[in-house]
Amino acid sequence: MLSYPLIDRYILGKYIKTFLLWLVLIIVIVITFDVSEKLDDFLKNQAPVREIVFQYYLNFIPDFFNIYGPLFVFISTLFFTSKMAGNTEIIAILGSGISYKRMLRPYLHGSIILALGILVIGNFVIPRSNIQLKDFESKYIHTHTRSYYSDIHFQTSRGVQVSTFSYDIKEQSAIIFRQDTYDRNGKLTDRISANKITYDTLSGKWKAQGLQHRTFDGNNETFTKANNAILGLNLVPDDFNQASKQISTMTSPELYQHIQHEKIRGSGAVTAAKLEFYQRLLNPLAFIVMTFIGVAISSRKSRGGIGVHLAIGISLAFGFIVFMRICSVFAINGNFPPFLAVLTPQLSFGIAALILIKKAPK
């Protein structure tokens, strides 16, 4: 009779080794195509080989693993499990007295190891590597990035709304600026507007051109006007500089604080930030879900062999990815809650995995 720990080590070893093999193989192929595509940019902007390898591609790998890891897990599970089924190894394992559910234990252990790994990488490692990636891209690939943002609206604190037609990052200046202050009842009490405001780094205040200041007290209105003035606004350039608020470069604790800050500001970017936050926490479940779907499909020996299993499996995997994208779009452009947008694909395919696992022994 076969030993349970021996079978566990055998399946777990195949699971991890096959996954790493597929991961390395695909990464090498992707990097090869990416180099050929960006080679002109590297040569034109004289990117050092050391920075290409260690700053760009070394930091490119974690994000690639995060995005496509569940797909690679799925394909590798299909591949080695189909091979085991074709060699009647699964029949031998089940014939030794081990139940089908018991045979799934090493698959579960392997998927949990990968899920925990990507949980740490996605929440803490990738944001830091993205900083290096974006620095490299700004220097050697996307050298002509825009220096301004237009049509900005946000809330600096409760009851204080800020808007501007455009904000220039380099000059730290806003064109057609307005700040409205409301009382607890939602009535406008103060309005500051200017043709242009520019931040003075020495004083920490804003220089305004074409200033108009209105205050409202019931039916009374006070109006002042000045060609040039100094304003002590509760604003810093970073409030306008949306480029510094790239959520992909924040660790999850930083992202959580950013979400709370954006809620106070009344920013429309809250939904995208929440979606990113929940994806980092819940997407690792896809490793477990896709592993069990892969086992359920490929553990039975078929006449078509691995080819049939791969065709069915890859169709399901891409269906899963498309479903995730659709839910994300509904969350950003619709009223679908970000948490449900991330959880729904995982839950739906998780239920499908349980059904397939239940039917697989039959």
Image: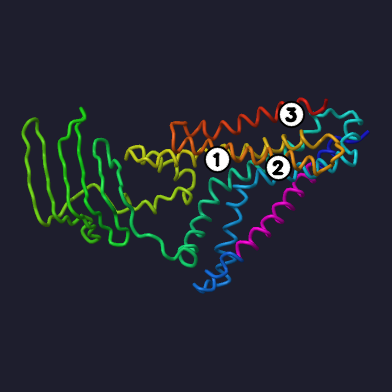
Q: Which residue is mark 3?
A: 356
Tell me residue 122's x, y (percent): 56, 46
| Badge nearest the viewer, 3 or 1 | 1
Q: Secondary structure at mark 1?
A: helix
Residue 199 location in percent, x, y? 24, 57
> Magenta stretch: residue 16 in it?
yes
Disc 3 to disc 1: CB gap under 8 Å = no
Question: Secondary structure under badge 2?
Answer: helix
Indicate which disc residue 314 carries.
Answer: 2
* Residue at mark 1: 325
Report which quarter residue 146 is drawn in.
bottom left
How is the structure coloured here? rainbow
Tell me how far mark 2 sits from mark 1, CA to CA: 17 Å
**178 vs 54, nearest the viewer:** 178
Q: Magenta residues, as a range?
A: 12-35
Residue pictured at 9% horizontal, 33% vertical: 217
Question: On the rendered image, what quadrant is the N terminus found in?
Answer: top right
Quadrant (top left, top right, bottom left, bottom right) of the C terminus: top right
Q: Pointers 2 and 1 in contact (CB under 8 A)?
A: no
Residue 25 is inside the magenta segment: yes
User: Is residue 335 placed above or below 190 in the rendered structure?
Assistant: above
The kind of residue on which mark 1 rests is Arg
Q: Nearer the viewer, mark 2 or mark 3?
A: 2
**Along the line of sight, the residue nearer the viewer: 236 or 339:** 339
Image coordinates for residue 213, horizontal then vertical, percent: 12, 45
Residue at disc 3, secondary structure: helix
What is the C-alpha distance between the residues marked 3 and 1? 24 Å
Q: Residue furthest right?
A: 1
The structure residue drawn at horizontal position 70% and vertical position 42%, both measured from the top left corner, is 314
Amino acid type, callout 2: Ile
Task: Name which of mark 2 and mark 3 comes first in the sequence.
Answer: 2
